[in-house]
Image (tube, helix red, strand yellow):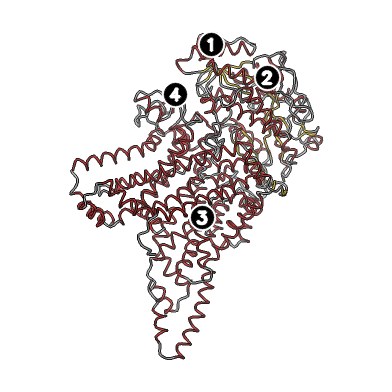
Amino acid sequence: MSKELYTRRQAMRLGLGGLGGLALLDLAACGGQAASGASTETLQLSFWGNASRNKLTRNAIQAFQQKHSNLVINSWYVDFTTYFNKLNTQIAGGSAPDLIQMDMSYLAAFDKQHLLLDLTSYISDNTIDMSNFDQGMMKSSEDNGVPYGISLGGNYECLAYDTNLVQQAGVGAPAASMTWEEFGAYVGKLSHALAAQKIAGIVDASGYMDLFEIWVRQRGKELWTPDGKINFTVDDAASWFSYWSGLRNSGACVSAEVQASVTGSGAATSLLTKGKAVFDITHSNQFVGFQALTKHTLALQQVPGGPGPGLFLKPSMLLSISASSKHAKEAAQFINFLINDPMGIRAIGLDRGVPGKPASQTVLQSTFTATDKTVLAYFNAITSGGQVTGKTVLDPPGAGKVMKALSAVAQQVGFKKLSETAGAQAFVQQTQQALL
Amino acid sequence: MSTLVSHSTADRRGRYRRPVGRLLLHLVIIAGAVLMIYPLLWMISGSFKPQDLIFSDASLFSSQWTTSNYTDGWNGLDLPFSTFFLNSLVVCLGAVLGNILSCSMAAYAFARLRFKWKPFWFILMQISILLPIHVLIVPQYIIFKDLGWINTFLPMIVPKFLATDAFFVFLMIQFIRGIPRELDDAAKIDGSSLFGFYWRVLLPLSLPALVTTAIFTFIWTWSDFFIQLIFLNDESLYTVPVALRSFIDSTGNSAYGQLFAMSVLSLLPIFGFFLIFQRLLLEGASTTGIKG
Amino acid sequence: MLPTPTRANAAQTPERVEARKRTRAALSLAKKENLAGYLFLLPWFVGLLVFTLGPIASSLYLSFTNYNLLGSPQWIGLSNYLAMVQDVQWLHAVKATLIYVVLSVPLKLAFALLVAVLLNRGLRGLGLYRAIYYVPSLLGGSVAIALLWQQIFDTDGLINRVLNAIGIHVNTSWISNPDTALYTLVILAVWQFGSPMLIFLAGLKQIPQEYYEAAATDGAGWARRFFAITLPMLTPLIFFNLILQMVGAFQAFTPAFIVSNGTGGPLDSTLFYTLYIYQRGFGDLEMGYASALAWVLLLAVGTFSVIAFLTSRYWVFYQDDRK
């Protein structure tokens, strides 16, 4: 509300009132926010996601507003692909959202520009109660040892697949754990069996940074050196591109054209929900979103195994507070509501990952759906399995750019504009540039 | 009037052509017309088809019809589309009012008044028509940011009150030049002020040009996307184009029918204007160029 | 132009005193008019200064800086311009934009002219035909139509369905194929030939019928009549449309943004120059680089326009110099 008043004052100063601008501004003001009142404080929350996440988030906000009748939280969301563009534009425009959903890959970059609030004081005065919170997840949302966000849930990279199509193909369910080679052969069989329907075994994931990271980690190293330089080699990247070229050439994964039709991210634009591929790569928390968009029954599958363990618990969906927020205290209360208040915990469920507090999981137990149970079972299986190794180096500020570079180079390799080796060289070079 | 003229010329030329040729010509033109609007018809029919049937064939007809795309799509985002329509309306009305006032004032000065450096300003005005907005957008963004106008409608409205749409200044100059000068002199002898003349005589006489300006401003602002994309952040302030675009993010593949339905609705105001003001629009569109 | 009656009277008045009085009155009137002229132009002046000239100048300055909107601009000299030459994406953007402009503008004008000539044969139902052909150009720039286009050229879209129906089986999307994506946008632009068509139609009606009659008596066929009379007579309008459409094509943004979901893909094939400015400026917050990009666009549009103007004297035929 304060925003409207401000603009109105500005308008007056310009003498716009006389030109009828004022009437328009009045109209504009009532077209917007729902609730208003003299003492009402308005916060803004930005996040990436889709309609179903939005619904859950709005539920959580509504529950929060019931407890804090003087607070109104507005929100906007877009797909992950465009999220950081839009967020950047808004911040540059001088009005950062109070609450910012943040990704690990961008945390350092935002901190470097001093855009995020140090949460230490709110944690120590218990505005945000972090007792019993998973220490690994906590660590991953720090930059230089300072917490700049609270993870709303952890998840593992995983594969989701269409069980109906697997049945149709008649090749049997996938083995619980497979090597990359075995997996490639398996999806090849799927493609072959479903060729008449032009359904491929798996999407072309060569441009997915998260999966590439696991590929590299399975080779016993992190993507980055502790001082934020590149730690993977041209060989790592070349072997990665070669693996996918193999699948592409044999028809085991979708063609470059089909993959190019995926311009967004998440379930909404997935080739799996579109019925063009049996397997897609996702995060365990997004499984619910995938299942919601298809009538077929989906299942989770572990990422293929490499020489060593490569999976790690990813604290996704950090919730950060803008350094310039005038309502930091209230924003912190909202974060606390989401991780500690049973109403908040229930409202968002597992959508943003498995909560960092064991107590929260207990709260959720009673409301679990079948899909939720699938996710939790997978989550626990991975946690206790031998494929996990904690991430020791956090993403440097340029990580977001590297993510974009991989997807661009992978597309060039996919369309055969670059050889696998040339692609690997280009990717390494662009990574070095992004990390400067 | 113009059709009358063309009819008579046709008769004169028609002597050389056989009726078969004319029939053929009609057929070619009709075929072309169908081709031209088929995509639009496909969209309209798709908006009434159940999701599964939209892409099943290219036909406009369907075994099942439904209006649920409209009802579901209307509430497909957080806020109902009525919010976005209202926002678009506010932006458009502001832009229309601004353009009508400021452009007619500037046009009056250029068309009728004698003042120093006029040829220079006139050329500058004409050049500014050709200036791409993308060249100006970064500094404009900084200005609006400093004014605190990001995430408000002001960046879309205020410049219009300052005649930044020089195209319409040009359009009105052309029109005002066609108004007999005797009127000016009569007004001068009457002792009415220049402003009085502008307000009481010129504006009413320029009504056709003003309406043309209003309609085109409305349509262009209604369809504009770039500026609205850049300046609006809050969903509660989204205009129709921005809302349509975010529709994809939220529903993705699952709701093409709803997407079509909302697309159709978003085009309705433009189409409505076209039907109501068809003659004025067509004349306006064809005459803006004639004297260029 | 008609001489104004008051002035004529003043010159003819025999009495000198009266004349002087009138001159003085005319002088102060001229002064008043000068002032009034500037007053009426005041909004326009403010707009010109604040939203046009000011931004042009400041974007020129910014183009020599490194600026992310959060700090203050740092002067880096020509670095942005030098970086551009080595920027592969910039090259892709230039290529996509030039192909788009060079293909879509002439095709659009050709269709506009062709249909205008066909429609100008004095057919019944001209009003309806004219309206139908015009509608796409009225709606075409909108997000809705760009979204529609995406569906039309998608794997299961209208085009492939029609092709399938006539026995040509295409199972890939025209939008996600880097070799065809740009051309779907060219088709979208050409589809909107309605507004230049209207201008041509109005121009065709102005061509004196006697010319055609004389030509017909000489036994000139339709082709000869078209190339000897219609085309030369229309050149001023062709020129006008050419400038307008060209400048418009350089500025196209919405279709590329919607169809590629803001990416300009696949393989940068739909990376319009304006989209690239948007990505670097508003996505990556590199406002300095974006300003340099914008200035290159300005120079390009300027150069193309000047070339068009300079060559126009060789091919644009002005019948007379009426104003």
Compared across the picture, whether B276 is left or right of A376 comes to: left
Q: Position of residue C292 (x, y in %)?
A: 63, 47
Disc on res. A189? 1
Task: Name the residue type under label 2.
Answer: Trp
Disc on res. B94? 3
Image mark 3: chain = B
Compared across the picture, whether B236 is left or right of A333 comes to: left
- Say whether marks 2 and 3 touch (CB < 8 Å): no
* Residue that numbered label 4 is attached to: C171
- Say whether marks 1 and 4 touch (CB < 8 Å): no
Disc on res. A215? 2
Label 1: how many residues lie within 10 Å, few (<14), some (14-19) or many (20+)?
some
Camera-side residue of A433 and B230: A433
In this rendering, is residue B11 above or below B21? Answer: below
Mark 3 secondary-structure assignment: helix
Label 4: how many residues lie within 10 Å, few (<14), some (14-19) or many (20+)?
some
Nearest to the eye among marks 3 and 4: give it: 4
- Say whether marks 1 and 3 touch (CB < 8 Å): no
In this rendering, is residue B225 above or below C41? Answer: above
